Image: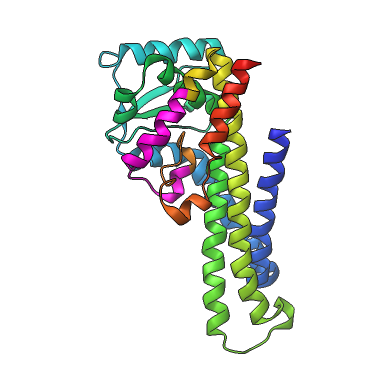
Amino acid sequence: MNNLKTVLLLGALSGIFLFIGGMAGGQQGMLLALAFAALTNFVAYWFSDKIVLKSYRASELPESEAPKIHAMVRELSQQAQIPMPSIYVFEQDSPNAFATGRNPAKAAIALSRGIIQLMEEAELKGVIAHELTHVINRDTLLATIAATLASAIMFLGYQMRWFGLLSGGRDDDRRGGVLGMIVMAVLAPLAATIIQLAISRSREYKADAGSAQLTHNPEGLATALEKLTVYAKRIPLQATQQTAHLFIVSPLSGKSLLALFSTHPPLEERVARLRQMRLS
C-alpha cells in the first residue's frame, strides 16, 4: 500500500505539472512542461547523489579512521543482501545523516561528524539501518524526483503569477482568464508541496520499521531519534530546504513556519511506533 500510495502521489505531482504548463501555454505549454519534467528527472536520476554530497562537502570516510562504522555497514548490508554502500562524512557538529543514490548498487550513506561523536553503538546502528532501508526501497530516488517536480511546479507557479499580474486586466477565455491563472499559480505549488510531504513522511515510517527489522532492536533507533530531537534544535544543521527530505530528522524542524511543512512525521510519533514494535 505504501508503494502504491507513492506511485499515485508521484502521478498526481506530474499531473499538476502538466496542468499548470497547459494553463500557461495550452498544448504547447503542456509539451514544454513534459519536456522540462523529463529533463529535470533525468538530472535527478543520474546526478542528484553527486550534487548533494558535494553541496555538503562530504568526503569518503576511510575504514582506517572508522573501522567499527564500516563493520556495522558491512554487516547490515550483508543481512539486507545489498551491495555495501559508500560511507561519507560531512563536517558539521549537528547530528544527522542521509542516504543518496539511484539504486542499491550506486548508494552512499553520509554521516555528520556530530552524529558519529554523539551516538552509542546501538543507536548509530539503528540510524545506519534506517538509511539502508531507504536505499533498499529506493526512497532517495523517489524523494528526489518528488522534490524536483515540486520545485519545478513552484517555479512555474511563480512565473505564472508574474505573467498574470503583468497581463493587466486582459481576459483570456481559452486559458481561464488572468484571475484563474493567478489562483492556480498559488494553489498548484501548495498542492505540490502537500503531495511531496505525504510521499516523504510515508517513506520515513517505512524506513523506521525497516531499521527495527534489520537490527532486531527498535529501541536503538528510538533512543537515537530522541537524542536527535534535542541536539538538532540545540545545534542547527546548515542545510537547504531542497535537501531537507534526505535527512533522518528534518534540519529545518526548529524553524517555526517551516516546521509546519516538514518533510518528516513528528519525531514523537516515530518513537512511539518504534517502542510499540518492541512491546509487540
Q: In x, y percent, where is residue 71?
A: 39, 10
Was residue 142 drawn as part of the magenta stretch in this picture? no
Q: In x, y percent, where is residue 211?
A: 54, 21
Was residue 227 drawn as part of the magenta stretch in this picture? yes
Q: Quadrant of the N terminus?
A: top right
Q: Is residue 187 above or below residue 100?
A: below
- Residue 142 occupies quadrant: top right
What are the residue bounds of the magenta stretch?
223-244
Q: Residue at x 56, y 18 (%)?
A: 212
**Total count of labels:** 0
Q: 88 left or right of 26?
A: left
Q: Is residue 251 above or below residue 175?
A: above
For the question of whether residue 117 can be seen, the reply is yes
- Residue 181 occupies quadrant: bottom right
For the question of whether residue 105 can be seen, the reply is no
Q: Is residue 131 above or below residue 167?
A: above
Q: 72 left or right of 12?
A: left
Q: 153 left or right of 85?
A: right
- Residue 72 occupies quadrant: top left
Q: In x, y percent, where is residue 70?
A: 37, 14
Q: Quadrant of the C terminus?
A: top right
Q: Residue at x 67, y 86 (%)?
A: 171
Front one among 130 and 65: 130
Q: In x, y percent, where is residue 278?
A: 59, 16
Q: Residue furthest bottom?
A: 169
Front one among 203 and 78: 203
Front one among 126 and 186: 126
Q: Residue at x 59, y 60 (%)?
A: 190
Q: Is residue 76 above or below residue 257?
A: above
Front one among 127 and 35: 127
- Which is the main secondary structure of the residues drawn in magenta? helix
